[in-house]
Amino acid sequence: MSSSNLFVQDALLNPRDLFFNQLYKTIPSAMAIITTTCGIRFYEEHHRIEKINTKLKQEHLEAQIKLLQDQINPHLMFNVLNHIYTLMQNDVELASAVLLKFSDILRYQLYECNHKMVLLYREIQYLKDLVAIEQIRWGDELDVNCKWNMTNQKLVIAPLLLVPLIENAFKHVSRLPHTKGYIIINCTESNNTLHLYIENSNSIKYKLPKKEGGIGENNIKERLLMQYPDMHTLQIEHTDDKHIVELTIQLKEEVCP
């Protein structure tokens, strides 16, 4: 039927029938407009909800990381202060040397560890200070062999991430009668990948019962999963005479504002 015939047919209808006839013709267009509008509105609302969920997940993750990091801070402080107190009973000069190292450690923890990331070379210097304190503390009772080699000064790492592994080596090293204990620490960086190897003497014969409330290995495992997913490997091996930890982390360079 031609358009002129349709016009004539519409003209013959009474106003009521004409109204419903025109309304019927506009239904497909109206439905298309309504469907498109609802679709756009649904997409916008879905996108808004996804952004909120992503933000909440990120805030929850950051809160978990902060909690794990905060476990390290007071734990270290109490340990170092206890070392200083013990040394003061026997050797004031050594206690003074440890106190100087402690001031560097405290300054680092107060002013630099509040950031999400810190420069790798600063974190390594912090670990060197901790090892120096432990060496002063144990003296000739332990052989400590360390190797540190960082090539990229721009790399960053999560603060206090490696501390529990270093602490555990000194905490659980065995010192058998008439035999020196030993600790080996090799920490190197190449091609933006950090390699940490820690080995310490171990003995099941004189092993002390494990205390509850330790925050070492579990702490670092959780933080690695949250902060370096698919970017790290961690292997821990226990034998009758030694304890070995091998860790690799792929790091990134500092992002300049």
Image: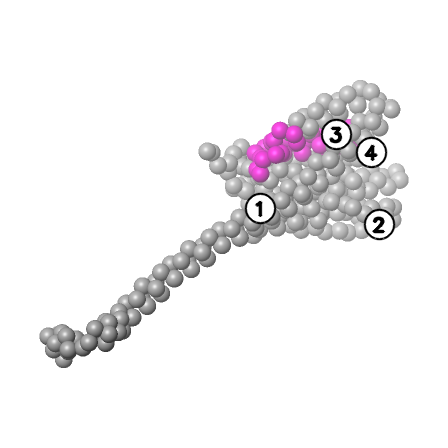
Bin the neighbour count of mark 2 within 10 Å (Cα to Cα): few under 14, some 14-19, many 20 and up: few
Prevalent SS, magenta region? helix
Pointer 2 or 4: first along the chain: 4
Q: Is residue 183 visible?
A: no
Q: CA distance from mark 3 to mark 2?
A: 26 Å
In this view of the protein, which residue sits in the foreground, 38 or 70? 38
Extreme residue toward the right, this view: 177
Image mark for residue 133: 3
Residue annotated with mark 4: 141
Residue 183 is situated, as x and y percent measured from the top left of the image, at 74, 39
Q: CA distance from mark 2 to mark 1?
A: 43 Å
Pointer 4 or 1: first along the chain: 1
Image mark for residue 205: none
Q: CA distance from mark 3 to mark 4?
A: 14 Å
Q: Name the quadrant of the N terminus.
A: bottom left
Bin the neighbour count of mark 1 within 10 Å (Cα to Cα): few under 14, some 14-19, many 20 and up: few
Residue annotated with mark 2: 204
168 over 236 or under it: above or below: above
Pointer 2 or 1: first along the chain: 1
Disc 3 on helix, strand or loop? helix
Is 165 positioned to the left or the right of 58 in the image?
right
Q: Which residues are magenta?
A: 109-138
* Mark 4: amino acid: Glu
Disc 2 on helix, strand or loop? loop
Residue 15 is situated, as x and y percent measured from the top left of the image, at 21, 73
Residue annotated with mark 1: 59
* Mark 1: amino acid: Glu
Bin the neighbour count of mark 4 within 10 Å (Cα to Cα): few under 14, some 14-19, many 20 and up: some
Residue drawn at 18 percent across, 77 percent down: 13
Q: Nearer the viewer, mark 3 or mark 4?
A: 3
